[in-house]
Amino acid sequence: QVQVVESGGGSVQAGGSLRLSCAASGTIFTIPAMAWFRQAPGKQRELVATITSRGSTNYADSLKGRFTISRDNAKNMVYLQMNSLKPEDTAVYYCNVHFAQYGLDYWGQGTQVTVSS
């Protein structure tokens, strides 16, 4: 079993920055791919960014240049640096841990990000 815990959410004014962290713990035999998703009120969950075990990254087109995903494999952690935040970035942000060879996904409980204008 793998536990996933996000932290770092909060309230910020438009133009500000936040850094989210996600820690994976438990039975981890291989280095998983990790990702951030978000879900705004009344909307579907959407992909924010992904990072492979080797550090290759991918971003939602609308977020390129403002958000940066990174990871620390030694600590089984992934981060999301969010800059120039906009009110439309307001959402619950979820961390995903994906073990492709086993077809397993683990999710955190989410952390709220609120951006005020």
Image (cartoon, helix red, strand yellow):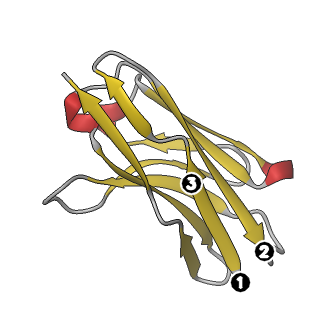
Q: Is residue 81 shown to the viewer in this render?
A: no
Q: Are marks 1 and 2 in contact (CB under 8 Å)?
A: yes
Q: Quadrant of the C terminus?
A: top left
Residue 77 location (% of width, % of height): 71, 50
Residue at (77%, 63%) from the top-left corner? 31
Residue at (39%, 29%) from the top-left corner? 64
Q: Which numbered tag is attached to residue 26?
A: 2
According to the image, label 3 marks what residue?
6
Secondary element type, mark 3: strand
Secondary element type, mark 2: strand
First of labels 1, 2 by sequence position: 1
Q: Quadrant of residue 65?
A: top left
First of labels 3, 2 by sequence position: 3
Residue 95 location (% of width, % of height): 52, 58
Q: Amino acid at mark 3?
A: Glu
Q: Amino acid at mark 1?
A: Gln
Q: Nearer the viewer, residue 52 or 34?
A: 34
First of labels 3, 1 by sequence position: 1
Q: Quadrant of residue 8?
A: top right
Residue at (18%, 56%) from the top-left corner? 41
Left or right: residue 57 versus residue 3 is left
According to the image, label 1 marks what residue?
1
Q: Is residue 6 shown to the viewer in this render?
A: yes
Q: Nearer the viewer, residue 12 or 46?
A: 12
